[in-house]
Amino acid sequence: MVLDRRKFLIGAGLTGLALNSSFLFANSGSTPDSSPITRNIPGTEEAIPAIGMGTWITFNVGGDPALIEQRTQVLKTFFDQGGTLVDGSPMYGTASDVVGEALDRLGARDRLFAATKIWTSDESATRQEAERSGRRWGVEQFDLLQVHNLRGWQGHLETLKAMKAEGQVRYIGITTSHGRRHREFAQIMEREPIDFVQLTYNVLDREAEDRLLPLAQERGIAVIVNRPFQGGSLFGRYQSEPLPDWAGDAGVSNWAEFFLKYIISHPAVTCAIPATTSVEHMKENMGALYGALPGAQQRQKMADYVRSL
Amino acid sequence: MSGAGWLSYSLEDFIMFGPQVFLRLFVRINQDLWPWPLLAVLAGILVPMLLLSQKSAPRRVALGLASVALVTSGYGFLVGYFGPINWPALWFGWGFVLQGVLLGSFMLFGGAPPSRWLDSKSAGYWLAGLWLAAVLALPWLTVAESGDWKAVGLFGLAPGTTAAAGVLLAGSLPGFWRWLYLAVPFFWSLFSAATFWSLQTWWLLGLPVATLILSFLAFRLSPSWARSRG
Ligand SMILES: NC(=O)c1ccc[n+]([C@@H]2O[C@H](COP(=O)([O-])OP(=O)(O)OC[C@H]3O[C@@H](n4cnc5c(N)ncnc54)[C@H](OP(=O)(O)O)[C@@H]3O)[C@@H](O)[C@H]2O)c1
């Protein structure tokens, strides 16, 4: 395995990728089972756990008391297993309110890395939308504000830069998904002083490997990965298949870990944000935050294996 | 967004809630309004009987009950329960309210009393039978889907059942208004069919399908409709 990692480093060097600290961390030595895998936010001393939590669909439960309580348990499990980053958006219906309510019940705001998005075509409404989201989450300010799907990004990004300078948000970024608008996305990454990008990347959807992930490394931009399970369809396709017999060597004991470790072992990736409605699934997903990570050769084998099924 | 950009979206990308949350809406509205749902069942059974009456007053009452049912399912279920987790439901909710107000206006202010389903005897019984089948059978689709009898989707509360039965009254409205009245259940059927397809809640697809079939049958069977075609 050490050999694999060394080869990976050399390979990455040959392709001209910048080896930032998170890259070295991702592949250095074995991670003790008891401590979560974390990643540095490039250019800072701050590290965040490599598995976060998404809230699209899963936390949009309206005012349903039973489901709010159930989702509170999902969030509790996430925190208990070492997670911190929760991703939301005003686009996700009542998810922000439900996260806020769950945080109230758990009294867990001190454990939270709060990440939401600006999602409005009114480019002058950035601050108002951030404030509205803050009230819904019950947080004074967000750790990360991202322009959702590049919607009105020019205006929003200008305001976000100003908000960051004023200390009203710690990090700013942009998002996309499903491989959409990658060209424009890359141009923004090249030109704008953003801290984070969020994009789709998983063992089947690997387009980001070509341009965006290397670019993020080069520019020192943290990467959040959405749709790590392709919206759940990876389980539908592969869960009935056996794991490869070398899975244990790659630190993988179930399919959730297989999919997530594939992602977070990429040197450019800071964090993956799977979403779930289930405490059991949350436990499985958080399993990927511990133990060994696959090396470069194993990652290739993982992608090949899935394609062969 | 460019045309090609839209092509990269699938139906599932627009669904922002899961099936469990949707089916729980029926449980919640039934529980929150208990015991009023019983009254809704009664109203659903009464409507066709009143419409078969020789006298015009009971027929007006029938339209009144149906219009209240459209308003309560629109404002109660769609605006109050479904809207918060799925914003297009808000628009449909107000559409249902409008549809109910339209029917109610004809009940109150319409010059002629609502046409009697008995104008054409066999057609009237058919319409009454279809109505009863809709309000008694369709509520169980949500039960079949969820496995929870408390999720029963009753006439006057659940928009699917209410829309399906409601279309049978289209013949009670004159010309243009009839088409306006049918527009809401028609678009609701398309919207809900797309939603249920994406959620893979196959039993629920019975609701929009039933609504479209009943619209067609209402068109064929309504006595006033048959008259106005001449
Ligand atoms: N443009 C954007 O900014 C953008 C776009 C897309 C997504 N996102 C963010 O990324 C997050 C993640 O993406 P996503 O929610 O679309 O999809 P995802 O995380 O790839 O998949 C979620 C699905 O996977 C299932 N799942 C999770 N863990 C599982 C397990 N251990 N075993 C079996 N099934 C499991 C869940 O079902 P169960 O509930 O049954 O577990 C759910 O249906 C979103 O929630 C959102 O925060 C952002």
Image (cartoon, coloured by chain):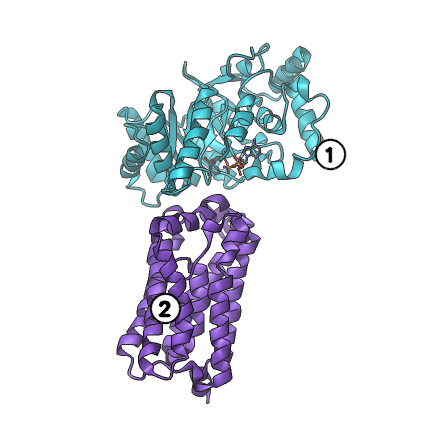
| Chain coloured cyan | A
Q: Which residue is mark 1?
A: A308
Is B24 situated above or below B173?
Answer: above
Residue A106 visible here: yes
Location of residue A99 in the rendering, given as x and y in whole percent from the top left corner: 37, 33
Three-letter residue code for mark 2: Ala
Q: Residues within 10 Å of mark 1 (few under 14, many from 20)?
A: few
Where is residue B161 drawn, in percent x and y?
45, 62
Q: Secondary structure at mark 1?
A: helix
- Is residue B60 positioned above or below A3 on the image? below
**Residue furthest bottom in the image:** B230
Q: Which chain is purple?
A: B
Residue B66 badge: 2
Please state if A152 lies on the left or on the right of A2 as rendered.
left
Chain name for mark 2: B
Q: How far is mark 1 from mark 2, CA to CA? A: 58 Å
Quadrant in the picture for residue B55: bottom left
Neighbor class of circle 2 (other Cα within 10 Å; few <14, some 14-19, many 20+) is many
Question: Across the whole image, how many numbered discs are drawn on residues?
Answer: 2
Can residue B82 be spotted in the picture? no
Chain holding disc 1: A
